[in-house]
Image (spheres, rainbow, N blue to C red):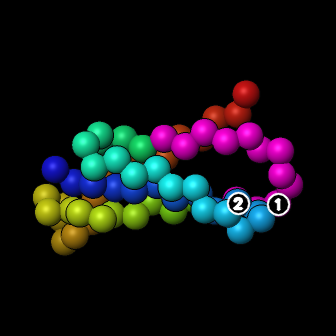
Amino acid sequence: VNNLDLLLFSPDGKTIESKSAVNNHEHIEIDLNQAGQYKIVVRGTKIPMGKNGLQPFALVTSTR
């Protein structure tokens, strides 16, 4: 029912977005070949069942 979207901002200013209105998970895979700061944003776009419009979530990162 609730929908969260995942956004990644790379050091060169590009935005990578994972938007799925049907799955309860989001996934972004990139090559970290660029030095600098990456920013991850989890945005609630539709949270009708959340408490006060909020939805708990977990974030997992991995490198290979």
- Label 1 sits on what residue type? Gly
* Residue 52 versus residue 4 in the image, above or below: below
Q: Magenta segment range?
A: 27-39
Number of other residues with Cα within 10 Å of mark 2, as a class: few under 14, some 14 to 19, many 20 or more: some
Q: Which of the labelled discs sits on residue 36, or is there none?
A: 1
Q: Is residue 20 left or right of residue 50?
A: right
Give the CA distance from mark 1 to mark 2.
Answer: 8 Å
Query: In which quadrant of the rendered view does residue 24 lie?
Result: top left
Q: In this view, does 19 lie to the left or right of 38?
A: left
- Label 2 sits on what residue type? Ser
Q: Residue at x 21, y 54 (%)?
A: 2
Q: Which of the labelled discs sits on residue 56, or is there none?
A: none
Percent x, y of residue 15 = 60, 62
Give the SS element for disc 2: loop
Q: Which of 57 and 25 is in front in this view?
A: 25
Q: Which residue is drawn at 30% across and 65% down?
A: 45
Q: Which of the labelled discs sits on residue 10, or is there none?
A: 2
Q: Do the residues labelled 1 and 2 touch (CB within 8 Å)?
A: yes
Q: Residue at x 40, y 64 (%)?
A: 43
Magenta-drawn stretch contains 35:
yes
Q: Nearer the viewer, mark 1 or mark 2?
A: 2
Query: In which quadrant of the rendered view does residue 36 lie?
Result: bottom right
**How many numbered callouts?**
2
Magenta-drawn stretch contains 59:
no
Q: In this view, does 62 lie to the left or right of 60?
A: right
User: Earlier along the polypeptide chain: callout 1 or callout 2?
Assistant: 2
